[in-house]
Image: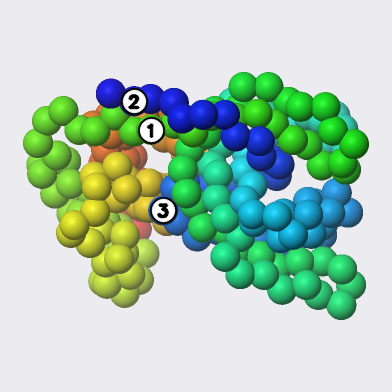
Amino acid sequence: MSGLRPALILPIFPLPDVTFFPHTLLPLHVFEARYRALVMDVLARDRRLAVVKLRPGFEATYAGKPAVHAVAGAGEIVSWERLANGRYNILLKGEGRVRIERERPSDTLYRLVEARRLEDAPPAADTTPTLARIRAACGRLLVALQRPADLLDTALADGQAPGVIADRIAAAVLPDGDLRQELLETLDADRRLGRVAAALEALVRELSGERE
């Protein structure tokens, strides 16, 4: 069963085209003043924040508090560099999914939310056939893209939970932003694996058609 942990207070980094999955690394170049302040404060505390995808139509209110999706990726800054102009290069390590429950009043330049960590529902059935589909599709995809055959070996390695493999492959190769957000919101590992397998197979068919 999926469940909820106690509430967390997290600063959020809203972005238009980024979905931050657990068990992945996300490099970011931070240049806006409000997010430079966020990074500075987070580094002085526990180094944790959430990256959340902006909802469509955000442009009209981007400088304020545009609407964001309810499910975000939470993680830790594991390395950082402060540049001479005050900007930052940071590397985030994904720790889990969170559901934003409400925004908290704050006198900071950036936004703070109250969120709860979400847990995967473990697979209810044998995932071996679906994982085999994912591995086969990844192999065909790398051939179609003329990339090294071992490029996704770490993401596909044995010994990982099936949901982790789904997250890592989705982060690495699936380009559709709406699908990525849907996968982030999918706590059922069986369903997430199936969606990743189907999306990979569709991507391979599309690329193969372009090359014919």
Helix, strand or loop for disc 1:
loop
CB of mark 2 within 8 Å of CB of mark 1? yes
Of 199 and 6, the residue lying toward us: 6
Colouring method of the image: rainbow
Of the numbered discs in the image, which one, if any, rests on residue 119? Answer: 1
* Nearer mark to the viewer, of 2 and 3: 2
Helix, strand or loop for disc 2:
loop
Q: CA distance from mark 2 to mark 1?
A: 5 Å
Of 86 and 156, the residue lying toward us: 86
| Quarter the N terminus occupies | top left
Q: Is residue 55 in view? A: no
Left or right of residue 202, residue 21 in this image: right
Q: What's under tag 3, amino acid-wise?
A: His
The residue singled out by tag 3 in the image is 23
Q: Which badge, 2 or 1, is on the more N-terminal residue?
A: 2
* Nearer mark to the viewer, of 3 and 1: 1
Q: Residue at x 34, y 25 (%)?
A: 2
Provide residue 123's location: percent of width, then percent of height: 20, 33
Of the numbered discs in the image, which one, if any, rests on residue 2? Answer: 2
Q: Is residue 23 in view? A: yes
Provide residue 6's location: percent of width, then percent of height: 51, 29
Q: Residue at x 84, y 54 (%)?
A: 37
Q: CA distance from mark 3 to mark 1?
A: 13 Å
Q: Is residue 38 above or below residue 143?
A: above
| Quarter the C terminus occupies | bottom left
Image quadrant assignment for residue 81: bottom right
Provide residue 88's location: percent of width, then percent of height: 76, 66
Q: CA distance from mark 2 to mark 3?
A: 18 Å
- Graded by Cα atoms within 10 Å as few (under 14), some (14 to 19) or many (20 or more), the crowding at tag 3 reads some
